[in-house]
Image (spheres, grey):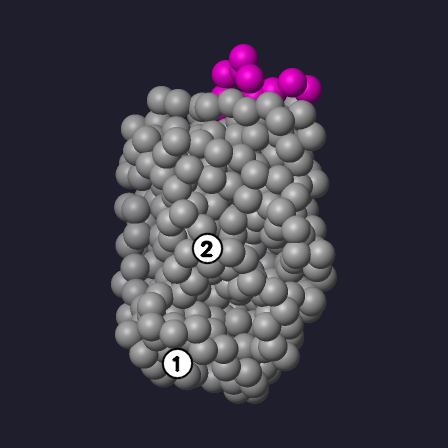
């Protein structure tokens, strides 16, 4: 593919380390302050690697019968939660790799879970309801029944939780047990992202569009023309731009001023196949994108949605998850064959290039 050849990283991505897990790696994340990388595979395996060398630290097999589905790392990095096809949620100690609490929800898949920004609550979507637990695994709150299976959840702040399902996005105050706001849309919502200030909610729809609402004004808009379902959505840390998948091009909408209404989005096009993962850096305007062909690119984005490539590499197979290290000096990528790659990212003190150097 153009810009990414072979397995050698280019531009500002540099050789780090690689490893393998036993099955399709679906989740990854940095824990213990970025000192270690946690990887989970579909067979229910969990693997912890030392962050700089890739040395295996511990491994757990079949932690969820039927398979692992989701991972959420606590803001302090010392604990994390997993869920799977067995209807259970497990809360873990990161360093020892020991399960400290078990939440039994019943028969069914648990596909979505999120720690609140302050780490006080763990939200879990199960079937048509959302549950909120404390760090000790005790239930604090639960929603009423949604009209369909909950497809996504996200925290707007440490007390307010958003859920998406067919035709609806709902904002709950989980402390006061109130519905703060509700938006309705005739369609199946397959993904959701909130701006950092919680004012904008964007949803990818089954009809190949992105719908968004501004909560402060009740304004809503639809962005159409995607070749496929935009299942990948990500805001930068300032809420200035929204990156979206849905094809082999990363489409970036700017929320500067009155945008994105009436504006032309940025189009980042170097991938040869559909985008499968997106991740913004923890600071600044760096976006990492991964595709079904195994290509990985890092972009420097401008506030208008345009961007320049800073580096690229090849992960070997479909990129299933991407995670920036907390200091943004390394990028972890896992793939559908169980491959794990960590590349160093080194910023040059020059104007961002128009291509790889």
Circle 1/circle 2 CB separation < 8 Å? no
**Snapshot quadrant of residue 229:** top left
Residue 65 percent coordinates (x, y): 32, 79
Q: Residues within 10 Å of mark 2 (few under 14, many from 20)?
A: few
Give the camera-side residue of 219 and 312.
Answer: 219
Q: Residue at x 50, y 81 (%)?
A: 102
Say which quadrant the N terminus sits in. top left
Would you place residue 150 above or below residue 64 in this image? above
Magenta run includes residue 229: no
Residue 356 percent coordinates (x, y): 48, 36
Magenta stretch, overall SS: loop
Mark 1 and mark 2 lie on one chain; the one further toward the N terminus is: 1
- The label nearer to you, 1 versus 2, is 2
Please give the residue where the numbered disc 2 appears in the rendered image. 145
**Snapshot quadrant of residue 105:** bottom left
Would you place residue 93 above or below residue 7 in this image? below
Q: Residues within 10 Å of mark 1 (few under 14, many from 20)?
A: many
Work out how far the residue at label 1 is from the one at label 2, CA to CA, in angstroms: 28 Å
Magenta run includes residue 258: yes
Please give the residue where the numbered disc 1 appears in the rendered image. 63
Q: Residue at x 43, y 83 (%)?
A: 59
In the image, the segment drawn in magenta is 257-266
Residue 350 percent coordinates (x, y): 66, 35
Q: Which type of secondary structure does the marked residue at label 2 adopt?
A: loop
Q: Residue at x 32, y 31 (%)?
A: 207
């Amino acid at each position: 593919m153009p810009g990414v050849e072979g397995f050698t990283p280019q531009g500002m991505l540099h050789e780090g380390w690689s490893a393998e897990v036993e099955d399709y790696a679906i989740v990854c994340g940095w824990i213990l302050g970025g000192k270690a990388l946690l990887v989970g595979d579909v067979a229910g395996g969990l693997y912890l690697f030392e962050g700089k060398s890739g040395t295996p630290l511990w491994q757990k097999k079949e932690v969820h019968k039927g398979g692992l589905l989701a991972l959420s790392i606590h803001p302090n990095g010392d604990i994390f939660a997993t869920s799977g096809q067995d209807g259970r949620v497990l809360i873990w100690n990161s360093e020892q790799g020991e399960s400290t609490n078990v939440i039994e929800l019943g028969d069914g898949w648990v596909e979505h879970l999120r720690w609140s920004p302050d780490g006080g609550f763990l939200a879990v979507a199960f079937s048509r309801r959302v549950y909120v637990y404390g760090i000790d695994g005790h239930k604090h709150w639960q929603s009423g029944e949604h009209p369909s299976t909950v497809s996504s959840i996200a925290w707007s702040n440490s007390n307010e939780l958003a859920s998406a399902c067919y035709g609806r996005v709902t904002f709950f105050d989980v402390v006061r047990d109130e519905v703060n706001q509700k938006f309705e849309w005739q369609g199946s919502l397959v993904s959701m992202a909130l701006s950092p200030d919680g004012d904008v909610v964007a949803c990818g729809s089954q009809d190949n569009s992105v719908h968004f609402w501004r909560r402060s004004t009740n304004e809503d808009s639809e962005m159409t023309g995607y070749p496929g379902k935009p299942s990948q959505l990500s805001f930068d840390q300032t809420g200035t731009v929204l990156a979206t998948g849905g094809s082999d091009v990363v489409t970036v909408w700017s929320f500067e001023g009155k945008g994105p209404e009436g504006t032309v989005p940025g189009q980042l096009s170097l991938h040869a196949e559909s985008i499968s993962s997106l991740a913004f850096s923890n600071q600044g305007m760096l976006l990492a994108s991964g595709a079904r062909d195994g290509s990985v690119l890092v972009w420097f984005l401008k506030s208008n949605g345009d961007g320049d490539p800073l580096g690229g590499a090849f992960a070997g197979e479909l990129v299933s998850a991407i995670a920036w290290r907390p200091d943004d000096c390394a990028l972890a990528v896992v793939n559908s064959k169980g491959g794990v790659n960590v590349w160093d990212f080194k910023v040059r003190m020059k104007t961002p290039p128009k291509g790889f150097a």
